[in-house]
Image: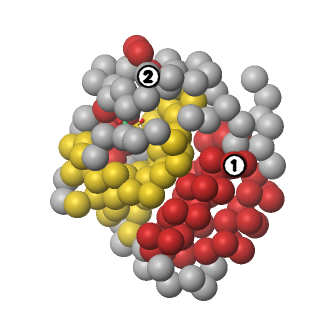
């Protein structure tokens, strides 16, 4: 599948939205809204934020979602515990996947950092199997890096 997202423009729009705005929740909410309107074939886009070793639901777009995810559980908890991007082409085959929306078939989770620690994750769900390409991973990791540099100082 080819990538249909212009990540250069997406990154510019993110910087324009959150640059100089000193409100973390507002910035994460706008970032979730930007992702949800910019990427095709998503059914959920948003954030979980770490409180100790628990991820707690943050700003998002999509259906209501589970509130707490322990580090190590599900796709989000795995990305947080292992501090790595986790791309799942078929969530039904992922051990421990937490199904918040039965429509989800693939998922991409990217850890967010401050001072070398995982402080949350960016989570994207799609109803399409294998929705996320290598180019999406790179573009969304860059998106997460822009958020980190503006938000979690
Ligand atoms: N599927 C995730 C849970 C969060 S929802 O996708 C919004 C997981 O397995 O961690």
Which circle's residue, 1 or 2, is located before the other in the chain? 1
Residue visible at 75% across and 23% down in the picture: 1
Q: Position of residue 53 (x, y in %)?
A: 19, 53
Q: Residue furthest top?
A: 93
The quarter holding residue 115 reads bottom left
Mark 1 residue crowding within 10 angstroms, few (<14) / some (14–19) / many (20+): few
- Asked if residue 149 is positioned above or below residue 107 in the image, the reply reads below
Q: Is residue 85 left or right of residue 37?
A: left
**Which residue, given by chain and number where applicable, does mark 1 sit on?**
37
- Asked if residue 140 is positioned above or below residue 20 in the image, the reply reads above
Tell me the tag on residue 102.
Answer: 2
Q: Out of 14 and 142, give the one closest to the viewer.
A: 14
The quarter holding residue 32 reads bottom right
- Asked if residue 46 is positioned above or below residue 99 in the image, the reply reads below
Q: Quarter of the picture for ligand 1?
A: top left
Q: Position of residue 62 (x, y in %)?
A: 51, 42
Alpha-carbon distance for marks 1 and 2?
21 Å
Q: Position of residue 20 (x, y in %)?
A: 60, 85
Q: Is residue 101 visible?
A: yes
Q: Position of residue 125 (x, y in %)?
A: 52, 34
Tell me the tag on residue 152.
Answer: none
Disc 1 is placed on an element classified as helix
Q: Is residue 82 visible?
A: no
């Amino acid at each position: 599948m080819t990538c249909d997202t212009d990540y250069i423009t997406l990154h510019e729009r993110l910087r324009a939205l959150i640059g100089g705005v000193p409100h973390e929740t507002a910035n994460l909410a706008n970032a979730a809204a930007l992702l949800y309107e910019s990427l095709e074939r998503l059914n959920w886009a948003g954030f979980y934020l770490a409180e100790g070793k628990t991820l707690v639901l943050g700003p998002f777009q999509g259906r209501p979602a589970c509130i707490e995810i322990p580090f190590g559980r599900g796709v989000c908890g795995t990305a947080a515990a292992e501090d790595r991007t986790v791309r799942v082409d078929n969530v039904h085959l992922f051990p421990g996947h937490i199904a918040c929306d039965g429509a989800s078939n693939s998922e991409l989770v990217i850890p967010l950092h401050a001072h070398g620690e995982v402080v949350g994750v960016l989570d994207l769900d799609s109803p399409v199997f294998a929705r996320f390409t290598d180019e999406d991973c790179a573009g969304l990791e860059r998106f997460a890096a822009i958020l980190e540099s503006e938000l979690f100082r």
